[in-house]
Image (cartoon, rainbow, N blue to C red):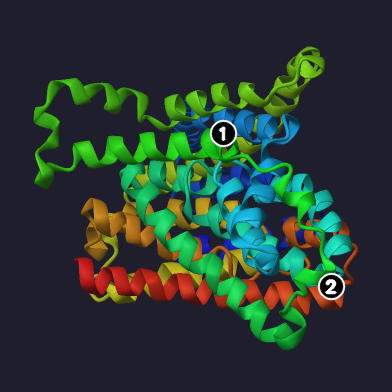
Amino acid sequence: MIIPIITFIGLFYFSYKFKIKPFLTLLFASFLSGFFLNISIPETLYLIYKGFYNIVIVIGPIIITGTLLGKFLNETGASRKMVNTFISFLGINNIPISLNVIGFIISIPVFCDAAFILMSSIVKDLSRITKKNIILLSVCLATGLYSAHVFVPPTPGPIVASAIIGADIGLLFLIGIITGAIVSIAGYIWIKFLFKKEFELNPKEIKSHEFISDRSIISFLPIVLPILLISASTIIKYPGLEINQFQFLIIFELIGKPEIALLIGLATTLIFLRKDKIKETPKWVVKSLKDSFEILLITGSGGALGYIIRESGIIDSLSLDDVSGLLSILSVFILAAIIKTIQGSSTVSIVTTCAITAPLLQSIGMTSELEKVILIVSIGSGAMTISHINDSYFWVVSKYSNIEMNDVLKFFSTATLIQGLFGLLVSITLYIFLT
């Protein structure tokens, strides 16, 4: 098993160096796994197809609806209304924390790269209005977006992790929200520490009416409603509460499925759709489907890799009695962090680490739903440690904020390191007190 892992790491390095598409790298890694594990070529190809198909069928609808929701939030202006609402209620002098929180919320259904691009014009406006360093504001937003990206379904990484590991997606959603919120605030506190006195805003210099005039609590409905539906569905199924004995609550099990809840959220974005924009909605749908296709290729390829390892039988020959509990949580964190640091993509890091880890669950004693979720939280923490020059998100933050590379390394990259370590601390805490 050590040889394939070393091969994967080397493969990811060369894929970054020669700009090879991540899904091609994962498919090639799957084929190499078959070779190293003495699986025949026809059987390897069949397992790659089966693993790819099984994952895409499970998570495809969630990724597509999540991408659609993100697109409609931006195009209808709902995301801008959310920002202005937060600022008007939290106060002008709390704009940095407002950006951090709103980034976390918006990134739940939207890929963090795309979400930052969508929000970049708002950050530039805020920098102009508040006369504050755009680095401060951009990194507050970026760290919030990044937190939901690695912890909270329906973002592709956590969704695929739940499918590969076999964890309850509703429970992952709830714990991911809590963990992501803590990690998001950790990033904000780190930036506040770095900027110190410069962090403070002068409300007298800012025209508050620019935010108050465009605030709307209803703008949060497209995201809050799916969150409530998914949470309700998870709580109802929890055996200890015995809520599921009430037959009329079964409806929440249906509408609380992530893909259905996201569709309901998507429908609520139509409240903000202006008449002159109706003709453009087909273009939004086509663009979203195109974006979804690329994400599905990555996640499906990760599923193929997981299937190869799971079906090989090599796990039965490994002695892993000493790797359990806290040690297993630390091990998957380190593996995810290594893959992330070498090849840059958090999603690929999560998918690959889960594919390697899934066959080991019995051996390392992480079999309950809660233990699986905690393991995924640790993997997600490693997958955000550390964002630097080989990460597309790093360059999105840099280019769309007009920030020099050295400043992004100093402020954003160090923040992702702090966030990843906080995520690991949360997963360790959850394991100690909840299992």
Q: Quadrant of the N terminus?
A: bottom left
Q: Are marks 2 and 1 in contact (CB under 8 Å)?
A: no
Residue 59 seen in the figure: yes
* Tag 2: amino acid: Asn
* Location of residue 52 in the rendering, given as x and y in whole percent from the top left corner: 51, 33
* Location of residue 416 in the rendering, given as x and y in whole percent from the top left corner: 62, 71
Category of crowding for the residue at label 1, using alpha-carbon neighbours closer than 10 angstroms: few (below 14), some (14–19), many (at least 20): many
Q: Residue at x 20, y 37 (%)?
A: 237
Q: Which residue is mark 2?
A: 133
Residue 349 figure quarter: bottom right
Q: Which residue is mark 1?
A: 66
Give the numbered dot on residue 386.
none
Residue 286 figure quarter: top right
Q: Residue at x 50, y 40 (%)?
A: 154
Please state which of residues 309 and 185 is positioned toward the viewer in this rendering: 185
Q: Which comes sooner in the sequence, label 2 or label 1?
A: 1
- The answer to whether 238 appears left or right of 352 in the picture is left
